[in-house]
Image (cartoon, rainbow, N blue to C red):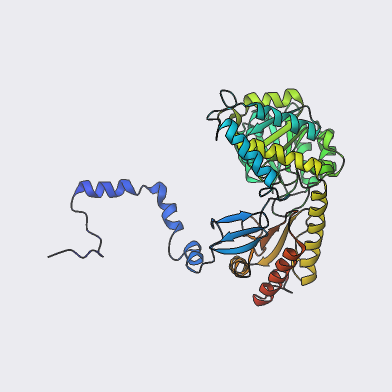
């Protein structure tokens, strides 16, 4: 008699039972629960509402192809629209032809090219700082800088809405970490006063996003600097979403207030306005050189490949020579903020090309995202805990190369979907 292939075969020996147990250790129970058919993940996937890890088959700046369909890209951080710029692509190709596809080592050993040194010099000059150091990703930049700078006898004061890489840096650091309520500088002051009274000898570092990635809101840089100076603390700004976006010539959040020279450390990434990947930190020479020798994410990671460095160099050149791109980006941002509000959407306060449109609960958010795909528009769905409960949103973001026609198509698609799902007029709570 043959066994039923649909029925699981019972274990017939202690050895088989032991093997089964070893294949499913308790550590992985949470992983199996994640895929339970009754859970949110399985239900969302089954209804084709899952918005993450969707493959993009082609991308040319403001347009992308997904599942064979062309979409308007309104969910990219390609703020200057340089990923498809022929000059940038040519620079990447030439660097690959000259240096090969990778460095196969860390900057400490065989991974430093003359291109890396040139980019560090150009960035320091652009930002008006003495020195710059490169990292392989923006995430590793903040993690490494915080780990290197803040030690066992120091205190980090971190905004609760800071990016995950700053959180990772505070966890990797041996310093104590105090998290203040988002943009609540009275709360920060209370923490600084307590630290000054209880631990007057401790080194103090205030770390914050320069532009918050979910809201598009600028940090309160002038007040932060006042507090830093009053309590003899250093200020570090993560300008991942600010460099090449805001400030004089795209020089970031502090530059917006004319305070770039006063901020002690500024970090940034190349995965947004600079059409590549990697990150950097700029500051005083001794401080940056110390970071270069102490940040484990710099010391023990392979260096940026030649093509990515050349991409950043060309993007920086274009940013300096074509300031009209920034003007266009700001024009688009203002137009889309007003456009969504005029349609009746709840739009979080934003000062950048990141424009969050609130739609309500998580299921509505996913249905809204899927309906926009059907309308030919790609945006990013953001749900709790990244945002407050009931405030799930469409995180839209724009690039200088979006055309007026594309902007109108985006607004029209939001208008149709907003009415269809009953979001317009409910301020995201209906």
> Where does residue 390 sit, x and y in percent of width and height?
65, 65
Count the marks: how many?
Answer: 0
Give residue 240's quadrant in the image.
Answer: top right
Residue 136 vs 51, above or below: the answer is above
Give residue 393's quadrant in the image.
Answer: bottom right
Q: Is residue 47 left or right of residue 122?
A: left
Looking at the image, which residue sits at the far left? 1
Along the viewing direction, whichever of 54 and 6 lies nearer the viewer:
54
Q: Is residue 197 visible?
A: no
> Where does residue 404 sit, x and y in percent of width and height?
77, 63
Q: Is residue 408 left or right of residue 17?
A: right
Along the viewing direction, whichever of 205 and 3 lies nearer the viewer:
3
Identified at 28% across, 50% down, the residue is 20
Identified at 54% across, 28% down, the residue is 105
Looking at the image, which residue sits at the far right? 258
Location of the C terminus by quadrant is bottom right
Q: Is residue 194 visible?
A: yes
Identified at 55% across, 56% down, the residue is 57
Residue 389 vs 313, above or below: the answer is below
Give residue 311's quadrant in the image.
Answer: top right
> Where does residue 116 sit, x and y in percent of width and height?
66, 29
Location of the N terminus by quadrant is bottom left
> Where does residue 260 sit, x and y in percent of width and height?
83, 37
């Amino acid at each position: 008699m043959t066994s039923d292939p649909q029925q699981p075969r019972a274990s017939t020996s202690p050895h088989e039972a032991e093997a089964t147990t070893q294949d499913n250790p308790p550590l992985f129970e949470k992983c199996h629960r994640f895929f339970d058919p009754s859970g949110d993940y399985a239900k969302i996937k089954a209804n084709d509402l899952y918005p993450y890890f969707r493959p993009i088959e082609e991308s040319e700046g403001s347009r992308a192809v997904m599942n064979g369909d062309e979409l308007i890209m309104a969910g990219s951080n390609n703020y200057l629209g340089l990923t498809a710029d022929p000059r940038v692509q040519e620079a990447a190709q030439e660097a690959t032809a000259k240096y090969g596809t990778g460095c196969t080592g860390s900057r400490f050993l065989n991974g430093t090219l003359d291109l890396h040194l040139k980019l560090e010099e150009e960035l320091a000059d652009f930002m008006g700082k003495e020195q710059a150091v490169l990292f392989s990703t923006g995430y590793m930049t903040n993690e490494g800088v915080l780990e290197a700078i803040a030690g066992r006898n120091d205190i980090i004061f971190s905004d609760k809405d800071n990016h995950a890489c700053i959180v990772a840096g505070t966890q990797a650091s041996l310093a104590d970490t105090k998290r203040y309520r988002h943009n609540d500088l009275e709360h920060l002051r209370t923490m600084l006063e307590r630290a000054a009274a209880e631990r007057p000898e401790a080194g103090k570092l205030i770390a914050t996003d320069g532009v918050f990635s979910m809201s598009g809101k600028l940090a309160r840089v002038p007040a932060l600097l006042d507090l830093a100076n009053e309590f003899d603390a250093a200020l570090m700004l993560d300008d991942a979403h600010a460099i090449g976006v805001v400030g004089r010539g795209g020089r970031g959040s502090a530059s917006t207030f004319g305070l770039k020279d006063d901020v002690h450390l500024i970090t940034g990434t190349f995965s947004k306005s600079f059409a590549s990947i990697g990150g950097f930190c700029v500051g005083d020479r001794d401080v940056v050189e110390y970071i270069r020798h102490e940040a484990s994410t710099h010391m023990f990671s392979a260096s940026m490949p030649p093509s990515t460095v050349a991409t950043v160099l060309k993007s920086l050149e274009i940013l300096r020579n074509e300031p009209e791109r920034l003007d266009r980006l700001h024009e688009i941002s203002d137009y889309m903020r007003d456009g969504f509000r005029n349609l009746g959407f709840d739009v979080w306060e934003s000062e950048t090309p990141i424009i969050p449109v609130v739609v309500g609960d998580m299921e509505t958010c996913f249905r809204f995202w899927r309906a926009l795909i059907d309308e030919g528009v790609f945006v990013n769905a953001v749900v709790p805990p990244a945002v407050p409960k009931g405030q799930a949103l469409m995180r839209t973001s724009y690039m200088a190369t979006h055309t007026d026609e594309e902007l109108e198509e985006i607004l029209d698609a939001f208008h149709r979907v907003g009415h269809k799902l009953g979001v317009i007029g409910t301020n995201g709570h209906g």
